[in-house]
């Protein structure tokens, strides 16, 4: 019942024009989030009625005080009226507290649920979604937009119902006291209503513009701070400061425009309210002089008029916040409603066992953000269980794209990828990704402890299992050397560890996960010789018994592979063992020759062109 009344009140006071048809749906969904808490809301609504009722009593008591007590010089009556007033204020305070607490409690719960739903919706989106959006924008939606909604569904909804009821009750009492005087007072209401309609349409657009501008500035800040080393190395602090300054100035100008509109609207409403009081005093004074109205009733009427004026002024000022909330809710629900491009099939297959065979069959793929550019063109090859296959090719050949298709981060536009003979699109996505592990050139660690990072592959692993994985990854020795051991914090992106240490933690994490298929993006290419030896030794343990795809940049890695697949411009141009391809004229032979030329010109540089 309360949810329905709240929705009606919102719709009545802030009815959108036909161009904003989504507003009704957004408010309906916000109200639906409130429905599970209806018992608390009913208690809050009862408190609201009692508290507002007490507020509506005291102007009449003041009039009674003037007409009977003071006029009759009745000191005992004065004491009684004052005691009643104190009692009214006490009851009003208790129930106002209950109303504010209960409504705010529900509002906080609703916004917390909404934040959680938004984060869950973001976390399940396909990788293409994140390719097309900046992290800063999404963080802004998660923080700023939900903060706007938080203010609206907590304090503002409570104020809306309180002052709405107070305005309706006040007008009813005014009509009962003097219909003629009420008609005079109500003459200014059309002005307020017209101003509210025009203001609502204007401020909604301005509020959306402000939120978008703030999101842009958040994007710049997040991007700059997360890449601060690159900024410093290119001495671009001033450039980035200027970019952020321009973005925040843009947000400031738009906020100023919104503030100007709000202030102008407030001035119009304040003048209309003051004019209403002036008209009441003028016409009511004439009625008192003619004997049609007592001085006490006129005083009560003026107090009720002020109460109604304040209530209407508050209600109309709340409109700005509700318009902000409309824009924020539109963006939040758009993200919540977005269905990821890569999803589980209606009846996903969860095989009992995983063997580790992977087959690419005529796979054609283009990234959704660059749909016109074909990255893989009818690619076909097979990874047999337990086999080590090196993927070689110049930069931009499509090697990393192949690696992204195996755990089904994307779906090909044509052809299919098979795991143990089953199309990936028929398998349970979570099960599939559990079978695939990866160690990249630049491993990503979370800003927690070493133990937490290793256990990310299996959250409920015992400390003994974590340490065993670290030993197998040649990490236990250096971890034990830290004062806090496995509880050492690695910092954001593992910044407190060296490159070799990060690699070994990533290998330990992959070992603990125990995948059937392993993807290695040449994990030793950026390391010194000592770290390379330790990491390579750990990788050999990790690769044992697993199907392994190596994105190869070094000849030593290629030699260790059972087969080599050579990609060029999104196509498989050669396939065979290292020796077979070396003896055959073609791209692979040229890549090897280029590597030897590099070795001759730069001692110790043994890298193939990367991609």
Image (tube, rainbow, N blue to C red):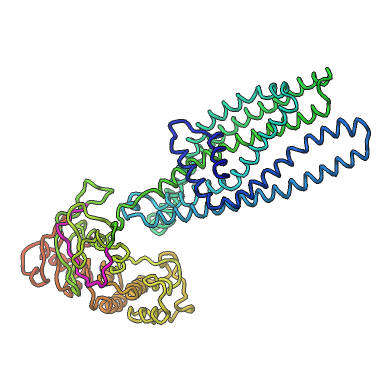
Give left or right: position of 298 versus 340. Answer: right
**Residue placed at 28% from the left, 48% from the top?**
369
State whether residue 230 appears in this view.
yes
Whether 254 is drawn above or below 192: the answer is: below
**Residue placed at 12% from the left, 71% from the top?**
578
Where is residue 580? Give x, y as percent: 7, 70
Image quarter hosting the C terminus: bottom left
Where is residue 472? Give x, y as percent: 33, 81
Whether 279 is drawn above or below 43: the answer is: above
Give left or right: position of 541 versus 489. Answer: left
State whether residue 249 appears in this view.
no
Where is residue 75? Give x, y as percent: 93, 38
Magenta includes 353? Answer: yes
Where is residue 466? Give x, y as percent: 39, 78
Count of numbered marks: 0
Whether 301 is drawn above or below 159: the answer is: above
The magenta segment: 349-365
| Residue 216 vs residue 355, the one in the foreground | 355
Image quarter hosting the N terminus: top right
Magenta includes 153? Answer: no
């Amino acid at each position: 019942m309360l949810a329905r009344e709240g929705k009606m009140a919102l719709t009545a006071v802030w009815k959108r024009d036909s161009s904003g048809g989504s507003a009704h749906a957004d408010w309906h969904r916000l109200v639906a989030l409130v429905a599970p808490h209806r018992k608390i809301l009913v208690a809050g609504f009862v408190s609201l009625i009692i508290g507002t009722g007490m507020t509506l009593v005291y102007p009449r008591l003041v009039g009674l005080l003037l007409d009977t007590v003071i006029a009759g010089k009745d000191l005992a009556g004065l004491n009684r009226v004052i005691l009643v007033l104190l009692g009214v204020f006490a009851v009003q305070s208790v129930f106002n507290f209950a109303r504010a607490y209960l409504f705010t409690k529900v509002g906080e719960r609703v916004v917390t649920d909404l934040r959680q739903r938004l984060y869950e919706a973001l976390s399940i989106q396909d990788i293409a979604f994140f390719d097309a959006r900046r992290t800063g924008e999404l963080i802004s939606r998660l923080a700023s937009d939900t903060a706007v909604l938080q203010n609206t569904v907590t304090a503002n909804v409570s104020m809306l119902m309180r002052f709405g009821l107070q305005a309706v009750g006040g007008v009813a009492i005014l009509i009962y006291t003097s219909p003629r005087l009420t008609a005079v007072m109500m003459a200014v209401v059309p002005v307020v209503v017209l101003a509210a309609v025009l203001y609502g349409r204007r401020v909604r657009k301005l509020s959306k513009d402000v939120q978008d501008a703030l999101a842009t500035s958040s994007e710049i800040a997040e991007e700059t701070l997360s890449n601060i080393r690159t900024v410093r190395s290119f001495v671009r602090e001033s450039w980035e400061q200027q970019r952020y300054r321009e973005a925040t100035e843009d947000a400031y100008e738009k906020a100023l425009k919104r503030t100007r509109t709000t202030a102008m609207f407030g001035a119009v409403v304040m003048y209309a309210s003051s004019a209403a009081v002036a008209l009441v005093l003028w016409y009511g004074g004439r009625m008192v002089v003619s004997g049609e109205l007592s001085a006490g009733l006129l005083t009560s009427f003026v107090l009720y008029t002020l109460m109604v004026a304040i209530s209407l002024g508050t209600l109309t000022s709340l409109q700005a916040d509700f318009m902000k909330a409309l824009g924020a809710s539109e963006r939040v629900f758009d993200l919540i409603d977005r269905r990821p491009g890569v999803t589980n099939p209606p009846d996903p297959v969860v095989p009992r066992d995983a063997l580790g065979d992977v087959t690419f069959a005529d796979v054609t793929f283009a990234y959704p953000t660059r749909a016109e550019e074909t990255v893989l063109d009818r690619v076909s090859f097979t990874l047999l269980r337990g086999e080590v296959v090196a993927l070689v090719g110049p930069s931009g050949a499509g090697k990393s794209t192949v690696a992204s298709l195996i755990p089904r981060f994307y779906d090909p536009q044509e052809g299919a990828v098979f795991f143990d003979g089953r199309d990936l699109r028929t398998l349970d996505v979570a099960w599939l990704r559990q079978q695939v592990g990866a160690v990249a050139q630049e491993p990503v660690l979370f800003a927690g402890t070493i133990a937490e990072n290793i256990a990310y592959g299996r959250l409920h692993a015992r400390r003994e299992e974590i340490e065993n994985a670290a030993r197998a990854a040649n990490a236990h020795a250096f971890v034990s050397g830290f004062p806090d051991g496995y509880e050492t914090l690695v910092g954001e992106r593992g910044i407190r560890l060296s490159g070799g240490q990060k690699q070994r933690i990533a290998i330990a994490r992959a070992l603990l996960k125990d995948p059937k298929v392993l993807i290695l993006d040449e994990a030793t290419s950026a390391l010194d010789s000592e770290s390379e030896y330790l990491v390579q030794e750990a990788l050999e343990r990790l690769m044992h018994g697993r199907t392994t795809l190596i994105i190869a940049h070094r000849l030593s890695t290629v030699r260790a592979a059972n087969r080599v697949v050579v990609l060029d411009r999104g196509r498989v141009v050669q396939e065979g063992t290292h020796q077979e391809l070396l003896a055959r004229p073609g791209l692979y032979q040229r890549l090897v020759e280029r590597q030897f030329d590099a070795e001759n010109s730069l001692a110790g540089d043994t890298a193939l062109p990367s991609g």
